Amino acid sequence: MSKGLDHETLNENVKKVQYAVRGELYLRASELQKEGKKIIFTNVGNPHALGQKPLTFPRQVVALCQAPFLLDDPNVGLVFPADAIARAKHYLSLTSGGLGAYSDSRGLPGVRKEVAEFIERRDGYPSDPELIFLTDGASKGVMQILNSIIRGSSDGILVPVPQYPLYSAAISLYGGSLVPYYLEETANWGLDIKNLRQSVVQARSNGITCLSEANLKELLQFCYQENVVLMADEVYQQNIYQDERPFLSARKVLLDMGLPMSKEVQLVSFHTVSKGYWGECGQRGGYFEMTNIPPQTVDEIYKVASISLSPNVPGQIFLGLMVNPPKPGDISYLKFVQEGKSVLESLRRRAHIMTNGFNSCRNVVCNFTEGAMYSFPQIRLPPRAIEAAKKLGKVPDVFYCLKLLEATGISTVPGSGFGQKEGVFHLRTTILPAEEDMPAIMESFKKFNDEFMEQYEDHTGYSRM
Amino acid sequence: MSKGLDHETLNENVKKVQYAVRGELYLRASELQKEGKKIIFTNVGNPHALGQKPLTFPRQVVALCQAPFLLDDPNVGLVFPADAIARAKHYLSLTSGGLGAYSDSRGLPGVRKEVAEFIERRDGYPSDPELIFLTDGASKGVMQILNSIIRGSSDGILVPVPQYPLYSAAISLYGGSLVPYYLEETANWGLDIKNLRQSVVQARSNGITCLSEANLKELLQFCYQENVVLMADEVYQQNIYQDERPFLSARKVLLDMGLPMSKEVQLVSFHTVSKGYWGECGQRGGYFEMTNIPPQTVDEIYKVASISLSPNVPGQIFLGLMVNPPKPGDISYLKFVQEGKSVLESLRRRAHIMTNGFNSCRNVVCNFTEGAMYSFPQIRLPPRAIEAAKKLGKVPDVFYCLKLLEATGISTVPGSGFGQKEGVFHLRTTILPAEEDMPAIMESFKKFNDEFMEQYEDHTGYSRM
């Protein structure tokens, strides 16, 4: 007789989940690291793990909130600036009991108010703190909304592919159906999807990561016509490396479109302290804002959030600091701005180094990283490499990425984890390794790739891209 | 046509969830607080919100981890003791990238090792860090394990009633069936449940909150015979207010029982930084340890944990500090021990004040709080009060608790949220209000209860308990 936690009796949806970002490649990389090999983890957007320094001011504020007895210490001014002290007092005044007390399940009302003010400044439309829930990172929010929407396998979630595996994993876990739309090529979907794909996303086939306002409008029009909820994953709103298409929130574009759409399209927007120039992944701070969601639904989402009592409070303070950073004239303003600028400028340079590096490699083509933190080069695998992979029972890009890992210590994620067209292969890497390490990493990649292609290419006619 | 987030199209399991700890009473209390009324929140075990001060040493360590640049500051020794500085360096050495980097989805390996060492010291049996997962509080761990176990409504989860509403809520959310066994009275369940109830839990009918070793053995025997997974919620292992039955972990008792049981019973044990004398609820730190769980299942649980990337890292550091506190001889040792002792002694006194207070009230009977942080007095509601409640469409104990809230600002949870026998009513309150406030709170309760009973009692024969 089998037991409740035997593998064969587990919830099937749990078993169906695939999560490539921390899948076979990551597990193998962790093993190699344990064996003493130096691993460059480019599998997950985790800037601090690759050397990015935390911003000073928010860390000072949260350290003071953690140790409120320092606020009474006569020496505190020797190690903390006055504006950090003032801000710590502000956040402590928003809690009852400091960082050690559960907050409301939606997060501290005072921080949700700061988020609403940030959204209003950013978009030019008022935002209601009651429709903003703080979360332990954006992923937790996405999971909560998907859990509320999905009733069973007949509920489809449209997901652009290549996708962030959070979506496919959470959809599996909750028993829904992922309905992919490919970002690069016409595929055989129904009319609506075809429209969506054609109008919104064909731009992507030219390597455009950042949607234009016109694209966003068409996407919202589609949601309106088809009664589709839009989940706007806007965690990379600070990470834009081109100047033509600045960030516009889906909410701003929706409200700009006016009635009836602005009151009809159901929209949930997500943001986090893990990305941007903050990169505070380990703190797990995020929020989601609900637009045009009925109050009864908001109540249900609140109730379910309450089961795990409250998002972590230090993460909520980081979120407050992100949406309400030091202002001109504050003691810490110049340092804060300088630190942030230096992170973003370096990311922009790294985006160029990486894209150029990949494009200089045999059988590798790569679009420029216009935003976010990732590069998604296509690897044109020779047929003999594909055969070799199949003999080992491996997906061809997993085979390539494992060999890359063993040879160089570079830990990437195979494109198959994100979705890609049949017979086309990619890898995903972050652009986060330290700028000074980047040339050596790209050199090491190139050397590996040259040898790989040399080994598997059929020299009788396969040409360099 | 309805939309994905309209109330009628939501996941039915989400709608079915009931979560009384933050239910109608809590919502009404929050409204009253907004209107300026002073509310005493005794609905949730949230010690810092009611004035418990955080322990100094762990806060110093985490503040330094948040602001690692302080470690290079020549003035740091003026505000932080040397052992806190050393410990902060230790934890930072266990991370790559400090608190701002995602850890492994199971938590930092170094902290999991500290947890394993703690369990070994506590129980006398070795523990494997690979079978310990850190979580954002114990609730998140419980939810993850239930999500893995529950396949559908034919999977029953045995839950002792009165229960912590986390269990009923999570079981609803994941679509399983709660199989209650009442802790006080013989009820009409099948033979196995009857055995379980009779052997393990009848002790409770005499007011025993802390199970004896013999009870735990019988419980484990039941799990062995019936192939039932045991989820051991041991978050109150530090909160024991009697001396006859000290804390024994389910794992220790199981392993003491020897083969075959010690290798057969599937056990998941939970612990947290939110309870004990720490009370660091807002930090969201916890762990679960798996015993006799097959490796394939551990892999599945790891995979699902990975979807939300990592538990918050400051919470992991708190957990490390809890399981590895200052030792005799350390600079901070005496202060740390003194702070912890003072919290626990005060809780013990408050348990007495509250129990005695309730038992001095008309139509109220209350067992002594032997452990944890709660009191669960039975309120013998007069028939006319029950009728008055029904006229308003309220469950009678909800009616009583709402009136208590409006009259006194004391925010409790009706017993119906935890389960109780038909026609019997309770309220649940924490024993956490500050010790100096306790007499006034009990006085205020007594005054309300006297008036309530006066109003609704049938003076023709209903006698005082």
Image: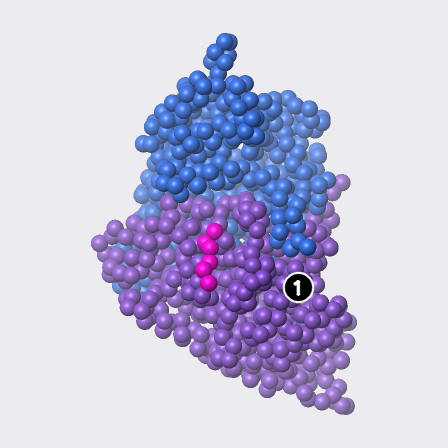
Chain colours: A blue, B purple
* Rendering quarter of residue A68: bottom left
Q: Is residue B340 left or right of residue B294?
A: left
Estimate how packed mark 1 is, as few (under 14), some (14 to 19) or many (20 or more) residues with alpha carbons within 10 Å.
Answer: few
**Residue at 40 percent of width and 47 percent of height:** B100
The magenta stretch spans residue A346: no
Residue B238 in percent (x, y) is at: 47, 70
**Residue at 70 percent of width and 33 percent of height:** A225
Residue placed furthest toward the top: A460
Decide which of A374, B205 is in the foreground and name it. B205
Decide which of B167, B297 is in the foreground and name it. B297
Is A299 situated above or below A343?
below
**Residue at 59 percent of width and 82 percent of height:** B358
What element does badge 1 sit on? helix
Decide which of B100, A360 is in the foreground and name it. A360
Residue B173 in percent (x, y) is at: 66, 54
The magenta stretch spans residue B128: yes
* Rendering quarter of residue A55: top left
User: Magenta region: which residues?
Assistant: B125-130
Q: Is residue A26 visible?
A: yes
By secondary structure, the bulk of the magenta-drawn segment is best described as loop
Residue B230 in percent (x, y) is at: 60, 62
* Residue type beneath disc 1: Gln
Q: Is residue A174 visible?
A: no
**Residue at 61 percent of width and 24 percent of height:** A422
Is B252 situated above or below A406?
below
Name the residue tied to disc 1.
B225
Q: Is residue B171 left or right of residue A347?
A: right
Residue placed furthest toward the front: B259
